Amino acid sequence: MQRTLLKDLWESRGKVVLIQGWVQEIRNLSKIKFLILRDRSGDMQTLALKGQTEEASFTAMNEITKESVVEIVGTVKENKESHWGIEILIKKIRLISLAATPLPVDNSDKSSTYIDKRIDHRFLDTRNRRVQAIFKVRGKISKIIMNFLDKNGFTNINTPKITTIGVESGADLFEVDYFGKAVYLSQSPQLYKQMFVSGGFERVYEIAPVFRAEKSHTTRHLTEFTGIDLEMGFIEDYTEVMDLIEEMIVDLLTNLKKECPDELKTLEISHTIPKKIPRLTMEEAKVMLKAKGKKYGLGEDLDPEGEKLIGEIVKEKFGSEFVFLTLFPSEVRPFYHMKPEGKKNLTKSFDLLFNGVEICTGAQREHRFDILKKQAQEKGIDLDKMEVYAEIFKYGIPPHGGVGFGLDRITQRLLNLENIREAVLLPRDPIRNSP
């Protein structure tokens, strides 16, 4: 017989089917035994009746443990009292793989097992339908964003994760011994994105691992995360990049509702699709925050408390879960961010906040080499020692800009997860490097 997935059983009412999966629950009574089976598509109640189930199978059910893998042959019957509306009357059951007891973690919906222990045994944790829903949604986020960028003329590229150059902060680099030479794990594909905008693709993106050697013990930082980075050429202003990101967010939320309604329902998630995302300059945001008792200097960035507060203000004032903060001080931005004409203390850059947490950073890049070199010197960086980076500006490069997202953080914020580790199958932080 061919296997039937549990989600497809409704169409097989009255028929004999073969199903396979993990034992989620089992309850043994004298003349009736209940077994909840789970596969990748869902779960289903099955039952064995003394006299109707093969005797050897009925007896064998006494030895089956939770999370064992079994194969069941049975008849699909309607049961209006069951929340599935149907159930399987077991004819025969075969044990494929017996699970040891006790389980190292509780993977039920009522589990109180701490996240670190769950990650230690992640393959058991992900058998939970809510945990699976998180990663099914995460997969759809990647798919929807890739489809959106493809429709908007972007080429998917893959860039090296072993590199000799960093364009963010050298202090954040992981050093690796590369056949006796010191190289680094990539902290950003920034150089390579700009290289291939200059290389004629004009619009490029990458979804790939990014590494940051930051000892950040927070619920929103990781040392290895999945970045969604894109760069677009021939722009007139950084607001064009924001326009694209706004369109992408609307497309993402719209298609998530279509592509994974069951998972969003399981996770009890609903978001309002924005018609227009508000845009505030950092100066305007600081004025709003000052009125709430939170003060910042001219060259300061917002801390997490300030981001959370401005998110609350925007939600109350504009009814939006999202807000763009623009024109960041040059003190808190990289040397390659373009500055507005006549405003050397600002940059043509932005952050996108989602319910008070930054999920995206973007900017127009400085493409004029003489100005770029001067801005690098102001930050204590000698471009002459960054020959590979400097070269891409010497042979014709268009005005361009781009952004960097964290897929993990987008997933965390979309699904209202308390800890970013919930959104990563096997997270890496300053103290975790396994499994």
Image (cartoon, helix red, strand yellow):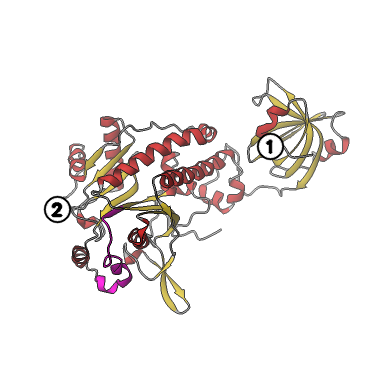
Tell me if 102 is positioned left or right of 273 in this view. right
Residue denoted by label 2: 341
From the image, which quarter does the N terminus lie in? top right
Residue 394 among those drawn in magenta: yes
How far across and down, in percent of the image, does residue 317 sit?
Answer: 25, 30
Queried whether the magenta region covers residue 411, the answer comes back as: no
Q: Which range of residues does the magenta coloring cover?
A: 382-401
Q: Quadrant of residue 87?
A: top right
Mark 1 surroundings: few (<14), some (14-19) or many (≥20) residues within 10 A? some
x and y, in percent, of residue 305 in the image: 29, 44
- Binning the other alpha carbons within 10 Å of mark 2 as few (below 14), some (14 to 19) or many (20 upward) gives few
Q: Vertically, is 167 above or below 112?
A: below
Quarter of the picture holding the C terminus: bottom right
Q: Amino acid at mark 1?
A: Leu
* Residue at the spot of label 1: 5
Q: Position of residue 430 (x, y in %)?
A: 43, 60
